Image: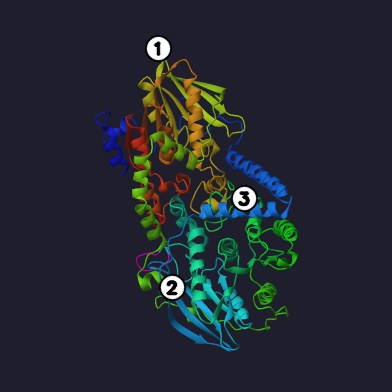
Amino acid sequence: MLYAAVRAVRCGLFRLFLLGGIGMLLPVPGHGKETTESSSPDALNVLEESGDSLLHDYLLEEMRESYARRRADLERAFASAETLEARQERLRTGYRDLIGSFPERTPLNARVTGAIEGDGYRIEKVVYESWPRHHATASLYLPTEGKGPFPGVLVVCGHIATGKASADEELVCLLLVRNGFAVLCVDPIGQGERYQLLNPQGEPTTRGGTLEHTLVNVGGMLVRRGTVKHELWDNMRGIDYLVSRPEIDPDRIGCTGYSGGGTQTTFLMAFDDRVEAAGPCCYLMTLEDKFAWRPADGCQHLAGEGAEGIETADYIEMVAPKPIVILAALRDMFDIESTRRIYREARRVYDALGHPDGLDMFEWDDGHTYSKPRRQAAAQWFRRWLADDASPVLEPDEVAVYPPESLQVSQTGQALTEWRGANVIDLNLQTARNLAPARESFWRDHATSECLARVRALIGWRDDPTVPTVETVGEIASKGCRIEKLVLRRQGEVPVPALLFVPDGATEDPLPATLYVDSRGKDAEAGPDGEIWKLVREGRLVLSIDARGYGETADNPKDKDAKKFWNVDYRNAVLGFHLGRSLIGQRVEDIREALDALLARADVDPARVALVGIGAAGPAALHAAALDDRFAELRLGGSIESWIDDVVAKPMARDLMALVVPNALECYDLPDLVKAIAPRPVRVADPFHPVEESAMR
């Protein structure tokens, strides 16, 4: 698609160089890092100390500053009940804007594939379509004693491979149904019978849960259909199913879950007004504390939360004074002191609104599970608020649970192989392609400058008009070239290490220049046979930079979540999304800074500055050239061509997270930026084809 876009806009003004001819212009993987002076891998380092935490520390500080502003805003809201309610409404609006619109509700086409008769209850095996042809599997627990209609509770699952059939989830459901509740327990995507990434034999290709949630989230974010939204919609449709049953009272609906189910409970209770009472369990931790510890998987972070000033406590405060019980463990991986801070803040809101009894917190001295004490506390809470019965709830000492296979809804064990429906990747791709007319009209009906202004806003680029300071920290004399070691600095920003290659024998006439950005690092092509030297021999001055997160500022390789979630930039990418500042946008800022530094030099011809983007730096370079017409031309090597084809369609590929911009496909794809650059030339070679995990084994 990128090739097609280049051809479409060339208009005879430039030539597209393809694989055979591009070798003289762009790097080929495999060139070494040796210099003419030393074979040391650190010979061309610029920073005095390791920079592998610079970007992360910078983002953490920005996150802390944003939440300091939030706390100040909250304090102002306590002026009156009216100001608190106005803040609630502002938060609800912001949250709904982040989620975006849902389609019209289509028929659930729900059916029961089997049933189990228990002592005082029946378990029905249910499947429904949350989206057309997209199947959700669930267990419906119905009381067979007592008089209905019964209050209903949606139980959402934690990150357990067996989903609804895990012992933890079964025990919650069994206690609730024996206390007069109808209970629907739904498999989340990536768990139970709802794995989305299957091999040709119908077997899961990943360990599911947190990993699958993260992989499908990357492409989903591009179309505002990340994992948070998919799970939220599945659960809203689950409530649709609950209230469709005559045995269930539609005005008495609760929700609970632990771990990843606590996450789903939190997002659901703040979005769906039908949830009248909730009990998030073993999840609540301030986002400020969580990011300082480590970000979680793709189902636990909604891009833009920080930009909207939303903290975890706000999901409770949005629904106050509805009854919420926080269920916590003293020895959880989620810090109990952080959970207590959430409770104390939300308590002030409930008190100020005149409903102190609507919020409670239950703690128990154990670990990360929906243990018996918390199950009893949850059941008692729902009895109190949904059944008008405050009597204690006790669970028997011994409760038998059903083996997972007995709760299986499908015959094959996987919804996708049983009903041959659509997985979330199909749904995301369909959405991306259905947005094509909107993208076309966006560029057709608006001036290019207006469209690019929207691109700036989406990537979170903050234009800084100040010229960066350039610090020279060393110099290497080499045959045919002088290499200056530089650090580019802007106040409050991550320093940009750089190498400036100045050809020998330069005349008084300004030279053409190239700004070189390679995701492998600024020195990846600095060897005597490297592409930088080829440019120098052509008489070009070359500035090669480590845009943030590359080379000397690449994130700490010991960050275990990078390996766990298949993305080397994981924690920094998630933090950037949280703040509304994608890594692409931040790297565009660095490229703009380096261009300013180049143009401040008397020996550079400002009309002949080219930009080169290699590998994962390609999308940032493409954005930079589209947004800054001071670049005379753009050269890309080893870059993705299209978000639709190379990201949304390839969830199993590694290291894509830093290459995306949330919600961008509502307005543009990468080929649209190529068109926006015309008539300036764009030369493309060696398109990047993401390597899937299965191909790496």
202 drawn magenta: yes
Residue drawn at point x = 62 percent, y = 79 percent: 176
User: Does 454 appear above or below 98?
Assistant: above
The image's colouring method is rainbow
Task: Check disc 2: other Cα within 10 Å, few if <14, some if 14-19, many if 20+.
Answer: many
In magenta, the rendered stretch is: 198-204
Image coordinates of residue 74 in percent, x first then y, are: 69, 49
Q: Is residue 688 visible?
A: no
Residue 623 is left or right of residue 343, and the answer is left
684 drawn magenta: no
Q: Callout 3: helix, strand or loop?
A: helix
Q: Nearer the viewer, residue 205 or 512?
A: 512
* Tag 1 near tag 2, CB within 8 Å: no
- Mark drawn on residue 291: 3
**Quarter of the rendering occupied by the N terminus:** top left
Task: Check disc 1: other Cα within 10 Å, few if <14, some if 14-19, many if 20+.
Answer: few
Image coordinates of residue 38 in percent, x first then y, are: 49, 28
Residue 268 is left or right of residue 25, and the answer is right
Q: Kindly identify which residue carries mark 1.
A: 509
Q: Choose the circle earlier in sequence order: 1 or 3.
A: 3
- Indicate the amino acid at tag 1: Asp
Q: Choose the circle earlier in sequence order: 2 or 3.
A: 2
Q: Kindly identify which residue carries mark 2.
A: 128
